[in-house]
Amino acid sequence: MDKRTLYIISKTDDPAFNLAAEEVLLKQHTEDIIFLYINKESVIVGKHQNTLSEINLKYLEENNIPVYRRLSGGGTVYHDHGNINYCLIENGEPGKLVDFVRATTPVVEALKDFGIEARHGKRNDLLAGYKKISGNACHVYKSRAMHHGTLLYRTNLQHLTESLKTGIVKFKDKSVKSVRSEVINISDKRLG
């Protein structure tokens, strides 16, 4: 059987549009899809997270950085023009749809082709050395899975850190908490 894959690159940096596009591509199409996009400065929280326990609200308000919720679980991430986002949507067998290593191996291999010694981490992330360069999440819809992730290429790491700094107020709830990791940009010369 001939397997057809659509390759799509978004022409907008609007996070609301790109997150909605992921959902439409997942739920209203049948082809396997690779969707790439870059968002303007924004914070994206996972489906099962308490937003206020994940963000630095004061900093986001002072810097006009909007917050969005995505369809998938996982931790909160920061997007800007230095962050490349990928969304891999594929059909599969129920029970075998969620496989982060299988889904992100093409990303790891592509990075290696560019001289980046990338590898899979233990938290569905990608690492260069011992620092995180990519966070990943997944959502299953019927017999389709959407694996999507970030690639920190030339992200403003100061804005990332400040945006995701949690306050002194601690929440007691059942929401999924982000696990903070030391991050690095792929373009950082120290990787070479």
Image (cartoon, grey):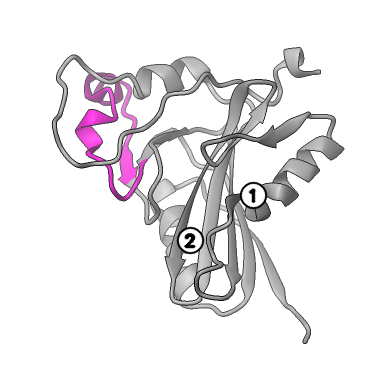
Is residue 47 within the magenta segment?
Answer: yes
Question: Quick check: is 109 in the magenta stretch?
Answer: no
In the image, 101 versus 29, the foreground residue is 101
Foreground pick, 38 / 149: 149
Sequence-earlier tag: 1 or 2: 2
Magenta span of residues: 45-68
Locate residue 69, reporting x and y percent: 32, 48
SS assignment at label 1: helix
Question: Mark 2 sits on what residue?
Answer: 22
The mark lying in front, picked from 1 and 2, is 1
Residue type (three-letter) at the residue carrying disc 2: Glu
Residue located at (37% from left, 56% from top): 71
Report if the CB atoms under discs 1 and 2 are less than 8 Å apart: no
* Side of 69 relative to 108 (left or right): left
Q: What label does residue 101 carry, if any?
A: 1
Image quarter of residue 178: top left
Distance from the alpha carbon under mark 1 to that under mark 2: 20 Å
Quadrant containing the N terminus is: bottom right
> 66 above or below 91?
above
